[in-house]
Amino acid sequence: MSEIEFDTSPVDAWIGVPLGGGQMKDPVAPNDLRRWAQGMQNPNPLYFDERVAAKSRFGALTAPFSFAVCTDDSHGAAPAIQGNIEGTHMLFGGDEWWFFGPRIFPGDRITRDRMLFDYKVTQTGFAGPTMFSRGDTTYVNQHGQIVCKQRSTSIRYLAEEARKRAQFSEDKDPVWTEKQIEDIENQKFEYYQSFLELGHERRLFVKVGDKLPTRPIGPHTIMSFTTEWRAFTMTVWSAFESDGLPSSLHQAGWLPEMSRDLEGAEVDPTLADGLYHGPSRGHVQQKYAQLIGMPRGYGYGASMGAWILDYLSNWGGEWADIVHSKMSYRSPALTGDLTLLNGEVTAIDHDDPSGQPVATVHVTMTNQKEEVLASGDAEIRLPTETLPPERE
């Protein structure tokens, strides 16, 4: 068998180059936050009910940590998808986040700086030669404060080779009984109650070995994936405008069936929608999922990242702050599957300069077959009974 060629030289020219893309035309609106909480299936009233939020640490509606990616026009992945490699598609391979203190509120204007960080090529059972590229997106508010930084890992691979190997081969959704669905719904209520009971209180007395409550999401459907997609601001027609800087995102070598028709979109915006026509249509259309090596509709990497960040912040409560999170994604969620999030406190650092304890939490995301979809560690700065005055 001849060796499969995978020319990465077009990518080299983009490393270290300040990249462009879309910037939000309008400030963040309250309904952006509400739509996000709804789309990510996160019924924490702090993010959608102004009456609850008024009694919080913040005194008003605030965005969850996960919302930052909603202010970008490409899930924060564009810097990791640069350089033309014909016949390729991409999956999310992971996200690393650093949070620097400022939170996002309605009325804020968030802009982004972007740059391709690095890449490597390895052989995978999924598609043979596969590029793992990392790109950085830095989120800045209207005051010039850095809100957070995202280092996204993009898995770029030859779609034809993935189809041949068919590593993901189950093309039918699993069947759930009414009793199983009822049990899942009860488990969801138990999880929701865990953070509703904490309310506006501070999470104190955390120790190594503490288990976070299990968070179930799903079973996933075409409808739930579509609702997630519509929660992203970038899916709203003309919500973003180009900042004029260079980017090769739309010329990255997408298959013709997975490419946006930017010229036609001047007449029919759905042609650049991404979901109806473009690189994301495989998420909700089995024909195109199988074209790029997936068996059926599959979830978004950005949503996986959001589920994890919401899981961590719901546990920590409003007085805790995520400092850092590094998660690796192994497999996407598929239609019909159930996603389960579990976490455990593995360390507590009492030497943080803030004077507050910082807990390390190991997170594992699995499906109903106990297959690992994602895993990693996060550091969360926990409250004390009395925080320093500048943080009260």
Image: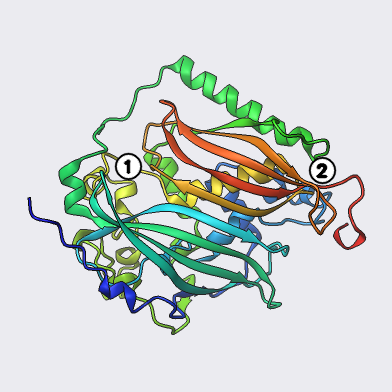
Question: Where's residue 316, x and y in %?
Answer: 73, 43
Q: Residue at x 76, y 34 (%)?
A: 207
Viewer-nearest residue: 368 or 70? 368
Q: Position of residue 204 (x, y in %)?
A: 83, 38
Instruction: For mark 2, give the secondary structure.
Output: loop
The quarter of the image holding the C terminus is bottom right
Q: Tell me the residue that label 2 is attached to.
A: 200
Q: Nearer the viewer, residue 1 or 274?
A: 1
- Left or right placement of residue 274 versus residue 64 in this view: left
- In the image, 187: left or right of 163? right
Can you tell which quarter of the image residue 197 is in? top right
Residue 180 visible (yes or no): yes
The answer to whether any part of residue 48 appears in the image is: no
Q: Horizontal placement of 153 versus 66: left or right?
A: left
Q: Distance between the Cα atoms at labels 2 and 1? A: 38 Å
- Which residue appears farthest toward the left when viewing the image? 1
Which quadrant of the view contains residue 211? top right
Among the two numbered marks 2 and 1 on one chain, the one whose residue lies closer to the N terminus: 2
**Up/down of 316 relative to 104, above or below:** above
Vertically, is 300 above or below 363?
Answer: below
Mark 1 belongs to which amino acid? Answer: Gly
Residue on which disc 1 sits: 297
* Front residue of this view, candidates 208 and 191: 208
